[in-house]
Amino acid sequence: MAQQYFVGDKEYFPGIARIPFEGRESDNPLAFKFYERDRLVGDRTMKQHLRFAVCYWHTFCAKGADPFGVDTQVFPWDAAHDPMAAARARLDAAFEFFTKLGVPYYCFHDRDMAPEGGSVAESERNLATLVALAKERQQATGVKLLWGTANLFGHPRYMNGAATNPDFAVVTHAAAQVKAALDATVALGGENYVFWGGREGYASLLNTDTRREQDHLARFLQLARDYGRSIGFTGTFLIEPKPMEPSKHQYDFDAQTVIGFLRHYGLAGDFKVNVEANHATLAGHSFAHELQMCTDAGLLGSIDANRGDPQNGWDTDQFPTDLYDAVHAMLVVLQDGGLHSGGLNFDAKVRRESVDLDDIFIAQIGGMDTFARALEVAFRIRESSTLTQRKQQRYSSFDSGDGALFEQGKLDLAALRNLAEQGGEPAHRSGKQEWFENVINQYL
Ligand code: XLS
Ligand code: CA
Ligand code: CA
């Protein structure tokens, strides 16, 4: 009997079987060209290196609406009128999708999985009911939770912020939601828990006490950390930076801002950073820059793999296709020793115009193939090119002699002055930027 890849009582993607690997010559849109799960790259398989995750929200909840138009997607799992029945159907569709695609992980917000109730207690019950079902589905399919989170931006009560809301009553509701989302994450064995503060910022400085709000944010994160640890969460808490949208300015602007914040408030031991590519470019950085800043700080937690559109100034959350960019990202990941307990979560959605049900498979396959190829290329660059060596060589004057003494803090400013006098004008040394840039192309 053919293996069944759906776990509920209905198949939501009939006609689509488990996505096979067919290699780059294949013209089957529903096949991997580069991602071969069990293929070894160094001492780990592609699956172990890449730790792919599907995001629940864009994939099964977002239906193509934009500020100028209503939904364009019609999803079969939304047919039921009762929100809890629809949530159950969505869960079954989600696990069928994860299984057919062959991803090891997924990520979700509380409200993606279960509808908000009329009270705190009812919302908690709704979530707990769906979490129990998700646990069964995880056991049946082997799919695991990369991270859970709470949606602290959608409900109108959060219009002035959640943990940073000027009204304490709203802060308590945010706490209730995070508490329940942490319970859910622990129940599902989630490896990380994410805070993305879309409305933790301001629209106007004139009406905002930014100092108090940032203190409140830190206090809130401390309480969440303490609660999480008290219920047995041993994973990593992650902050996901984004400079703006929906707020004009978000406190978690970019990686370096978050790193400074975590260190300032004593949170760096439990929290790391979840870097999203599209948020990096919105902050005026590159994806690789954000990854590098986190790696340098020892705080790279996980990755939301997507891309923006350079001609649009907002968060388009498109699937990654730019190989050069992905190779650069994977070079940093490999430098960091891999993704550890993080993963590559495709926080990306198909376009409003992509309305066939197989489009979500095609999109996800494209993202996975991009990163599978990028992994191989980055691995080869590190193995066979002299890129890493040449980067180190640029700093060789600090490896011995006075340069080493400087690094060790054994020279004062006056001593440096005397060395300058003795040494005379330094020779011009080329940065060889174009050579470095060409190496990536050579290995593509
Ligand atoms: C929105 C964010 C969000 C987080 C999770 O821009 O990317 O989806 O990843 O709350
Ligand atoms: Ca985004
Ligand atoms: Ca994200």
Image (tube, rainbow, N blue to C red):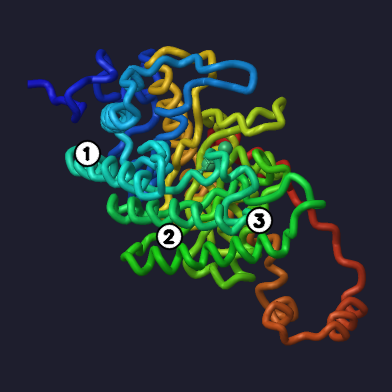
Which one is nearer the viewer's eye here, 173 or 382? 173
Residue at figure coordinates x 51%, y 60% from the top left:
272
Q: Give the amino acid at mark 3.
A: Pro
Q: Do we see residue 2 in this rendering? A: yes
Q: Residues within 10 Å of mark 2 (few under 14, many from 20)?
A: many
Residue 241 left/right relative to 424 = left
Q: What residue is disc 2 on?
A: 236
Secondary element type, mark 1:
helix
Residue 193's quadrant in the figure?
bottom left
Mark 2 or mark 1: name the one nearer the start of the chain. Answer: 1
Q: Is residue 338 visible?
A: no
Q: CA distance from mark 2 to mark 3?
A: 28 Å
Percent from the top left, x then y, of residue 204? 78, 47
- Residue lying farthest to the front in this orientation: 118
Nearer to us: label 2 or label 1: 1
Q: Circle 3 — which element?
A: loop
Query: Quarter-wise, where is residue 153 in the image?
Result: top right
Three-letter code for the amino acid on which mark 1 is drawn: Arg
Disc number lying in front (2 or 3)? 3
Q: Earlier in the sequence, mark 1 or mark 3?
A: 1
Q: Dot 3 corresponds to which residue?
A: 166
The amino acid marked with disc number 2 is Thr
Dot 2: element: strand
User: Residue visible at 61% across and 38% down?
Assistant: 278
Q: Position of residue 324 (x, y in %)?
A: 59, 35
Residue 137: numbered disc: 1
